[in-house]
Amino acid sequence: MATAKLAQWAVNLQFSQLPSSVTQAANRSFYNWAGCAIGGSTHPATLKASTALRPFFGQPTSSLLGRSASSQDGKADAQHAALINGIASHVHDYDDTHLETIIHPTGPVASALLAQAEALETPTSGKDFLLALVAGIEAECKLGLTVWPKHYDLGWHITSTVGSIGAAVAVGKLLKLDEEKMGHAISIAATQVTGLREQFGSDTKSFHIGRSAQNGLLAAALARNGYTGSLHALEAKRGWVNVVGAGSNRLEEMVGSLGTIWEVEKNSFKPFPCGIVVHPSIDGCIQLHDEMRERGLVANEDTIESVKARVHPLVLELTGKKTPIDGLQAKFSVYHGAAVGLVMGKAGPAQYEDPLVISQEIVGVRERFEATADGNLMADEADILLTMKDGTVLRKHVEHAIGSLEAPMTDEQLQTKFKDQSMPVLGRNGTAAASKAFRSMEGAESVAKIAPSI
Amino acid sequence: MATAKLAQWAVNLQFSQLPSSVTQAANRSFYNWAGCAIGGSTHPATLKASTALRPFFGQPTSSLLGRSASSQDGKADAQHAALINGIASHVHDYDDTHLETIIHPTGPVASALLAQAEALETPTSGKDFLLALVAGIEAECKLGLTVWPKHYDLGWHITSTVGSIGAAVAVGKLLKLDEEKMGHAISIAATQVTGLREQFGSDTKSFHIGRSAQNGLLAAALARNGYTGSLHALEAKRGWVNVVGAGSNRLEEMVGSLGTIWEVEKNSFKPFPCGIVVHPSIDGCIQLHDEMRERGLVANEDTIESVKARVHPLVLELTGKKTPIDGLQAKFSVYHGAAVGLVMGKAGPAQYEDPLVISQEIVGVRERFEATADGNLMADEADILLTMKDGTVLRKHVEHAIGSLEAPMTDEQLQTKFKDQSMPVLGRNGTAAASKAFRSMEGAESVAKIAPSI
């Protein structure tokens, strides 16, 4: 009866039942998502998708984030807005992570939810929006925990396979579906299993997030109008868990933990737009940059003698690229990440632009960096020893990298991340307005008014 | 390299390479599909879907078959037309069957293809249309043969899981994609795995066919505009065959047989809108009706003493419902099927309308019918012994039921089926025009002009 139980839980969830830590985590997740979607709006993959699909656009009810939303050209019908914002939010691999399942939970859910909220005639309050967002994120993460890790090992992109269902729950909550219709929405979403891991490395990886948002939105729209699916779609012999979940028997347990253990509280945010294993090294190098700065020192090929890092073995396995030639390759290079950290004290999107990657300023320092695998270190740990030509020796031990659950990004750091992504797209004023609106959703009277006002 | 080989084959396929038996089979398949989509256009599931999605409709380029296509209200953007025509074409379970895989091949492919052809600015000739249709049907059936039967046993609705890819190939062919873009289209379609068998019995079973048409159409539109997927999406370790095909190793073999063994030639058509296991009994009863008629006899409760049938054991297992109370239940009743065959000499959609199912005219004969399971009979075989009160004894042995590969429906029988479905929707003139246009596609100058002219 898991399908029915999930539907019942979602329909009956009240804002007053949400601990403030949950609403805060949900708003941080949404805010981080919005920054990623704005930042990703100018990526070629996002633009290819929107150009290809523009001939199919319906009534422009919903914003394409980052595209001068006050003009008609920056809007689409809700289904296409969900798809395109979903692509944009994931295309830089900079979105959030539910670390237990490596689901990026907010992409599918928020992409569908914002598009639907903007398409409604009645205003959606920020509280109702956050409530629906929490319902959707909890649903997808509980289903992810049910089938993790076999489902992912088999080859499914777990973010999108569970994302369709999370998006349906969130949109269904926003549309105030009753329990039976919510069950049908979950069912229609579950039957659309989108996302093969073979697509990693191609544009289609981001498509998965957009399409799962659209799958869920479509499922809720159909269910709202009486369209039916099996009300045992998750638990039945030939239902979702058995067909794609490799025989997991944890469904009842996970659905039973809804509202007791809140998954959104375990959501984490990437401080740097690159593979998470590089983050401890970057974190340490930024700390070294800051300490040098306090001492009046700068890092460049003339000042640095050597930088020796001990890192978790996965770092060299996954990100051992010594001579990246563009931004994409740089994401898989601990050498580049360390160098920009040391030289610039930052590793945001601007530090992964192609010209910088091959600039002598960075390459000169990159070549001074050596990394050694050390099986005694944790994945979020690094130890870095910097020796300068003037004899100065500095050392940083990063026990838990920034962005891990033990060292979450502060609100201020999230704002910096938002601005780094939004500035090149919306400029200073647009970014300030967007940042303010998206980070304080709880007080919003009408969510639909936010994006068009930016 | 199966993804690339499939793309290469589809891109290079020429109309002149198609044997006439293939083009004829393709046109018969399309004609049968069109009749089903027109007949299904007034079904509640189709109407619920179109009502729910109308707010999202874009430019009305493409016909919703059966809905007074000359008005704007009877059109939608190509994506929604593909979805809704796809639902309509399957909703009566009356569409075609590739018997080796029980795929219903034309639904996903034709629903996408017609919608796309109508949306193009340049006219699509009937020959180009049939060529694309063949490419799509061959692609999906070869993939179906690759993963059958484990894929279906696991719980996947094979028609829609392979249908997305077939639709992408067909639309990609129509759009004249090059080999690389065709590969991307196949890839983007493959990552959208739609259809759990748990949905059988709900509206969502038909949704699968519509959504797979839409998945393929979307994939081709994205690929056309440069959107990329993995070019090893079918064969890779974490690609389609391994993730959903339960480890089949037949992919290369099946792709290698493209253009040598034509799957569309093996497509079959249902003469009666009910479970295929009942067909031999209905066939025999219609033959008895015709013979009685020649002898000046009629079948009713006063004239018939008994009807004793020997049937394959599955008949009673799947369709043993003795006292159906409506049309849906009657589809699972060999008793009803036999009775309408004997009394009316037909078993079309009109014979499955609710009032007829509980009429004394039919119930009186139904009660005289006895069926006995006989393990020595084949699934498409039946033996029926009719004893009339006047002492007349008639017997029919059906070796291969009408609609099986050994006894395919004639063109004339397909026309009768088309008219039985279309008449209640389009009326006499519309039906005559539609039947003529859809059954002679090869000579059409512009496919886009057909539906709006009906």
Image: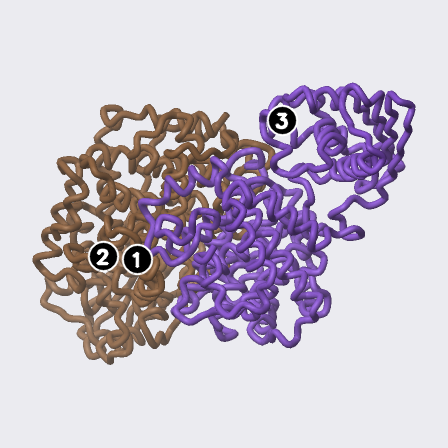
Chain colours: A brown, B purple
Residue type beneath disc 2: Ile
Say few, some or many: other residues with alpha carbon within 10 Å of mark 2 (under 14 / 14 to 19 / 20 or more).
many
Report the number of numbered marks. Answer: 3
On whether disc 2 and disc 1 are found on a single subunit, the reply is: yes
Q: Name the residue under label 1.
A: A88
Q: Is mark 2 on a helix, strand or loop?
A: helix
Q: Is residue B64 above or below residue B120?
A: above
Sequence-first disc among 2 and 1: 2
Is residue B317 found left or right of A386 in the rendered image? right
| Dots 2, 1 in contact, CB < 8 A | yes
Disc 2/disc 3 C-alpha distance (Å): 60 Å
Query: Within the image, what quadrant is residue A406 found in?
Result: top left
Nearer to us in this view, B260 or A124? B260
Find residue B271 and report its horizontal and vertical position in percent.
69, 44
Q: Is mark 1 on a helix, strand or loop?
A: helix
Q: Residue at x 52, y 32 (%)?
A: A230
Q: Name the residue under label 3.
A: B356
Residue type beneath disc 3: Leu
Q: Name the residue under label 2.
A: A38
Q: Which residue is drawn at 54% across and 50% down?
A: B431
Q: Which residue is drawn at 30% across and 30% down?
A: A176
Find residue A206 and report its horizontal and vertical position in percent.
38, 57
Label 3 marks a residue whose chain is B
Say few, some or many: other residues with alpha carbon within 10 Å of mark 1 (under 14 / 14 to 19 / 20 or more).
many
Residue type beneath disc 1: Ala
Disc 1/disc 3 C-alpha distance (Å): 55 Å
Find residue A415 and report its horizontal and vertical position in percent.
16, 51
Farthest front residue in view: B296
Q: Residue at x 45, y 31 (%)?
A: A254
